[in-house]
Amino acid sequence: MTRSIHRAQAADADALAHVQAASWRAAFDGLLSAEYLAGLDIAALRTGWSALLSEARWPRAGTLVLREAQREDIVGYSRFYPSEDTDLDPARVGEIGSMYTVPTVWRTGAGSLLMTAVLDALATAGYSTASLWVLEGNTSARAFYRAQGWSPDGTRQITRGGPAEAVKLRYQRVVPRYHS
């Protein structure tokens, strides 16, 4: 299966909204409220993506899309930017704010390919460290991140997914220096 990764464009907003809804509904089933997940609004997500993609912050921030080459369908994405955590230095710490793929490509290497690309983008942007947040109960994602060289740093926070609360854990890792 041939895949490619590209910088997201404004025209990708609709596809990103659909990938986000599909991946969240599968990944967070049982972790966030069913009402919240069922209520994910494609039009609102599309509007949000359109606004994000219009920001010209590359190379310090951006979104990468993963495409299936045969159909040119977007099947995943990763968004990164300077860390927003007050205890981290945004000049050297880049945060992966989101990294999702549609369930049909889970455990096919798509996530590893996307992770490699976003770490490369972080290195190119000059970050030396990367961070991300993951729901404590999302054992599949936590295992994936550990296998990719990430470790929890002991920082926790509470998030809301509709009326329910969930605990998020912060993971960090060194950004490898790529020679792209």
Image (tube, helix red, strand yellow):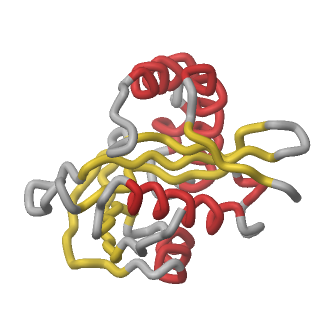
Specify whether 76 is left or right of 165: right
Residue 101 point in image, percent of width and height: 64, 52
As drawn, the residue found furthest toward the left would be 87
Specify whether 122 is left or right of 180: left
Q: Residue at x 52, y 78 (%)?
A: 148
Figure quadrant of residue 1: bottom right
Specify whether 2 is left or right of 115: right
Residues 68 and 5: in front is 5
Q: Residue at x 14, y 62 (%)?
A: 88
Residue 157 point in image, percent of width and height: 21, 60
Position of the C terminus by quadrant = bottom right
Q: Is residue 58 above or below residue 91?
A: above
Residues 29 and 91: in front is 91
Q: Is residue 1 above or below residue 44?
A: below
Residue 31 point in image, percent of width and height: 46, 57
Q: Residue at x 81, y 37 (%)?
A: 72
Residues 180 and 7: in front is 180
Figure quadrant of residue 172: bottom left
Q: Is residue 45 above or below residue 30?
A: above
> How many marks overall?
0
Residue 91 point in image, percent of width and height: 17, 55
Q: Residue at x 37, y 39 (%)?
A: 162
As drawn, the residue found furthest toward the front would be 179
